[in-house]
Image (cartoon, helix red, strand yellow):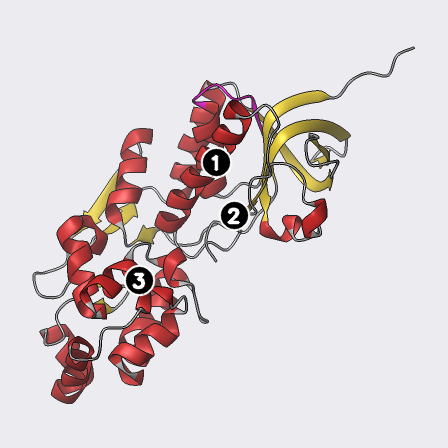
């Protein structure tokens, strides 16, 4: 008897954090056949996000209610990086001496700070060690649970470029505010992150996306133009295999492959994306790359690996 062919999908998503589900939705809504293999990932932990416009727009699209928190005039900041060095909020923490130290950021020589990817090094260099320790790091811990360093591009997209243009970190915050006032807002999902997950899964069901709860996933790479074979163990213990033209998977999974064996269409989605707003932006970029690769090219080029923050 002929061997039964494996079920084929355009895109397989191996993850269950909100960013991965956004990417799956972006692919499904334009007609790609998508399967989501939901691992018990560590979800994005924060229920509040800085770049309020991004998270707010997504939630509005999904019908999820949010509350936007607009800071008092003069106290605007992005994860503790102040727009106004002499605000009462800054002086209450650092005093006048600390406020003047932050102001020196505007007098320093213009430099290509946009190339600096370390948030901690950038803040320490431009605003000083005390501002880093007393203003920025407490916010990273309280808002995101981050105790170590983080990539500026992942956490605050556009800040490095804005800072390079104006030659100052605090003026960079002001420039971002001028382009989009919501970047200094905090948005809270009223019913918590579970409401966001539920809404995303409802949209995936609407677009007939196949979803499986899984405990284990293995990926077999073929030649660069081949599909990827994905074998998974479902929560009921059954083992199943399928093929996909493109794979959105965790960064850890993509790192199991050497560069020359990287399967076609691999895209890395990091479980520890530092903020939902950054992850949403990155996931949509990933989805756009996948669509272009699968719809515009007869021979699919590799996509990625692309990391959704972290």
Crowd class of label 3 (few under 14; some 14 to 19; many from 20; radius 10 Å): many
Crowd class of label 1 (few under 14; some 14 to 19; many from 20; radius 10 Å): some
Residue 223 in the image, given as x and y percentages of width and height: 74, 36
Main secondary structure along the magenta-highlighted residues: loop
Left or right position of 225 against 141: right
Residue that carries the numbered disc 1 in the rendered image: 289
Mark 2 and mark 1: Cα distance apart in space: 10 Å
As drawn, 283 above or below 139? above
Residue that carries the numbered disc 3 in the rendered image: 160
Res 136 quadrant in image: bottom left
As drawn, 22 above or below 146? above
The answer to whether marks 3 and 1 mark residues whose Cβ atoms lie closer than 8 Å is no
The tag earlier along the polypeptide, 3 or 1, is 3
Left or right position of 248 against 135: right
The answer to whether marks 2 and 1 mark residues whose Cβ atoms lie closer than 8 Å is yes
Mark 3 and mark 2: Cα distance apart in space: 19 Å
Left or right position of 273 against 11: left
The tag earlier along the polypeptide, 2 or 1, is 1
Region in magenta: 29-35
Q: Is residue 34 magenta?
A: yes
Is 258 in front, or is 31? 258
Give the numbered dot on residue 77. Answer: none
Residue that carries the numbered disc 2 in the rendered image: 306
Mark 3 and mark 1: Cα distance apart in space: 24 Å
Helix, strand or loop at mark 2: loop
Look at the image and tell me in which quarter the N terminus lies.
top right
Res 89 quadrant in image: bottom left
């Amino acid at each position: 008897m002929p061997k039964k062919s494996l079920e084929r999908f355009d895109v397989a998503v191996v993850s269950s954090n909100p960013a991965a589900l956004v990417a799956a939705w972006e692919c499904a809504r334009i007609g790609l056949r998508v399967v989501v293999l939901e691992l018990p990932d560590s979800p994005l932990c924060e229920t509040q996000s800085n770049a309020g416009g991004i998270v707010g727009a997504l939630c509005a699209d999904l019908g999820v209610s949010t509350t936007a928190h607009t800071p008092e005039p003069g106290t605007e900041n992005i994860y503790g990086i102040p727009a106004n060095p002499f605000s009462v909020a800054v002086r209450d923490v650092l005093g006048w001496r600390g406020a003047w130290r932050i102001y020196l950021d505007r007098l320093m020589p213009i430099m290509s700070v946009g190339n600096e990817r370390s948030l901690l090094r950038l803040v320490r260099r431009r605003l000083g060690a005390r501002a880093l320790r007393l203003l920025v790091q407490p916010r990273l811990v309280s808002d995101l649970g981050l105790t170590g360093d983080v990539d500026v591009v992942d956490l605050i997209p556009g800040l490095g470029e804005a800072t390079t243009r104006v030659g100052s970190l605090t003026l960079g915050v002001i420039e971002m505010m001028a382009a989009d006032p919501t970047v200094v807002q905090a948005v809270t999902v009223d019913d918590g992150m579970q409401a966001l997950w539920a809404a995303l899964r409802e949209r995936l069901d609407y677009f007939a996306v196949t979803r499986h709860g899984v405990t284990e996933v293995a990926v077999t790479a073929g030649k660069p133009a081949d599909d990827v074979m994905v074998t998974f163990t479902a929560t009921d213990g059954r083992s199943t295999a399928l093929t996909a033209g493109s794979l959105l998977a965790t960064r850890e999974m993509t790192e199991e492959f050497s560069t020359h064996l990287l399967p076609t269409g691999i895209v890395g989605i990091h479980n520890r994306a530092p903020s939902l707003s950054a992850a949403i932006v990155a996931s949509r970029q990933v989805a756009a790359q996948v669509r272009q690769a699968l719809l515009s090219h007869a021979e699919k080029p590799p996509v990625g690996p692309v990391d959704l923050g972290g």
